[in-house]
Amino acid sequence: LPSFIRENFGAETSALPVTASRYQTAAQAAFALNSATLVTLVPKLIAEAAEWPSLEKAGVAKKEIPGAGWPELIKPVLFVHDQRYSQTPAFPNASCKELGVLKTRRWDLPAREVHVWRCDPAVEISGSS
């Protein structure tokens, strides 16, 4: 995964935080990236956000009040999902584009597909880092 991102989309893109909407996908991405970049799960509910202290560092705003704008993106991120889940990024204030698909095989059989998206907030919030 890190080589695929770096070789296909450049060093700047490979330095972006990585987000996922499924725990297993986030865990697998974190393992594959081996601390090369920040990886976090984007919880489905605002109430679960407290369990993920790295959300804001990863580019997702923490909100105290539930609302239709969750999850709010505050800086560019990569979003990953595999072929088991067709869930695309769901950041209401962002523009997301699929960059590519990493396909792995076992012998002659398809084994896994990891879809890599780049999401940019409609307006980057100043002071976010």
Image (cartoon, rainbow, N blue to C red):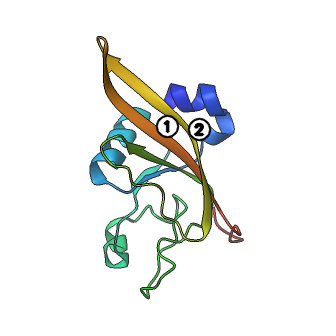
Taking the image as shown, residue 104 lies to the left or right of residue 60, namely: left
Q: Quadrant of residue 42?
A: bottom left
Q: From the top left corner, tell me how far across and down residue 52 is, in percent.
A: 36, 64
Q: Residue furthest bottom?
A: 65
Q: Which residue sits at x=64%, y=34%?
A: 9
Taking the image as shown, residue 103 lies to the left or right of residue 119, namely: left
Residue holding disc 2: 14
Type of residue at label 1?
A: Ala
Mark seen at residue 104: none
Classify 34 as above or below 89: above
Residue 1 appears in the figure: no
Q: From the top left corner, tell me how far across and down residue 117 is, in percent.
A: 54, 46
For the C terminus, give its image quadrant.
bottom right
Q: SS at mark 1?
A: loop
- Pair 1/2: label in front: 2
Residue 64 appears in the figure: yes
